[in-house]
Amino acid sequence: MKLCVLEGDGIGPEITTATLSVLQVVDKKFSLGLHFNMQEIGFKSLSKLGTTFPDHVLAAARASDGIVLGPVSHNEYPPVAEGGLNPSGRLRIELDLYANIRPASTRAFLPRPVAPAFDLVVLRENTEGFYADRNMASGPGEVMPDPDMVLALRKITRHACARIAKDAFALAATRRGKVTAVHKANVLRLSDGLFLEETRKAAAAHPEIAYDEVLIDAMVAHVVRTPDAYDVIVTTNMYGDILSDLTSELSGSLGLAASLNAGTEHAMAQAQHGSAPDIAGRGIANPASLIGSAAMLLGWLGHRHMRSEFLNAQKALESALETALEDSKARTPDLGGQGTTRGFAAAIISAL
């Protein structure tokens, strides 16, 4: 199995190195046959090649079985015309990684800002919506008719809504059997109305799965008050991006937030948090999010290729991650611990 590894910017190289050290142990323990293809993106690539995302990197990612992407500082990149492409956005579009799967669950041994324990997944459509860098075949989804006016275009297609709805019900069938569709159809009647048409069709095809609908503004209140009421939350791109950051933080920290970008042919492990340049190089960045994402990637590969050893490796890695998180000496400072990036990875390896 070939994995394309992209370190990214800021703390990206540090947490990617930690993740690779763990994956190498898992690879040996479960005889996975992993091969890592390291490629440069971000500011390193910009300084050498004039672009943050070269064509040969896309080709390498396309030729791989999976991708591990470290966080990138795309907000600081130059304009696209000057080489400042967002690697995450381009990979999601070019490889059709339409489903962004973001689990969030509490842990008894970690403090959290809400009382109820919960275990939920936000399933976010990943390729369209209001995101101007990925919702048009040519040109951005924002236009400026004059210097004092900007128009933003939202793209919602029946095809994208149908497949993310289908995935939501398939996921719920493996969990507690409930899907919640989050929308704003009382205002965005056509676009969110189309989204709800497809989630309702999926619900009708799966009467064994409980189904409800909640407005996005109400939902941000509900997940604070009663997060334990939800199982699989399915929604469009921007709502899911915001909502999943909230649920991850409510679970204890955004630094715990695993994330998988998945399509039918490719999948990409990606930490949910940013590149944190303020702590880059200090050795204290929390690699838990990217390591958890890598575990999800192993599971995806196991299901896609019907390889039980990959599913076993996912379970073992997730168990070892929990063991390391429970140890305050291993946990990084953002989680109230005393550990380092390398030390946390070493604790996971020890648990394995």
Image: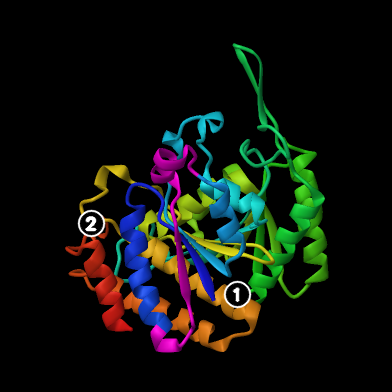
What segment carries the magenta color?
Answer: 28-52
Q: Does the magenta-highlighted stretch encompass residue 262?
A: no
Label 1: how many residues lie within 10 Å, few (<14), some (14-19) or many (20+)? Answer: some
Closer to the N terminus: mark 1 or mark 2?
1
Residue matched to label 1? 176
Q: Quadrant of residue 163?
A: bottom right
43 or 174, nearer to the observer: 43
Q: Which SS class for mark 2?
A: loop
Q: Which SS class for mark 1?
A: loop
Relative image position of residue 133 (x, y in whole percent) = 61, 38
Residue 284 is labelled as 2
Q: Quadrant of residue 335?
A: bottom left
Relative image position of residue 174 (x, y in whole percent) = 63, 77
Q: Residue at x 56, y 88 (%)?
A: 308
Kindly report which numbered mark, 1 or 2, lies closer to the viewer in this rendering.
2
Assign the N terminus to one quadrant of the image: bottom right
Q: Residue at x 28, y 56 (%)?
A: 285
Relative image position of residue 232 (x, y in whole percent) = 61, 64
Confirm whether residue 326 shows in the render: no
The kind of residue tagged 2 is Ile
Relative image position of residue 192 (x, y in whole percent) = 74, 44
121 or 277, nearer to the observer: 277
Q: Does the magenta-highlighted stretch encompass residue 37?
A: yes
Label 2: how many residues lie within 10 Å, few (<14), some (14-19) or many (20+)? Answer: many
- Name the outermost residue toward the front: 48
- In this picture, is 320 found above or below 135? below
Query: What whole-number distance in Å separates the C-alpha atoms at marks 1 and 2?
Result: 36 Å
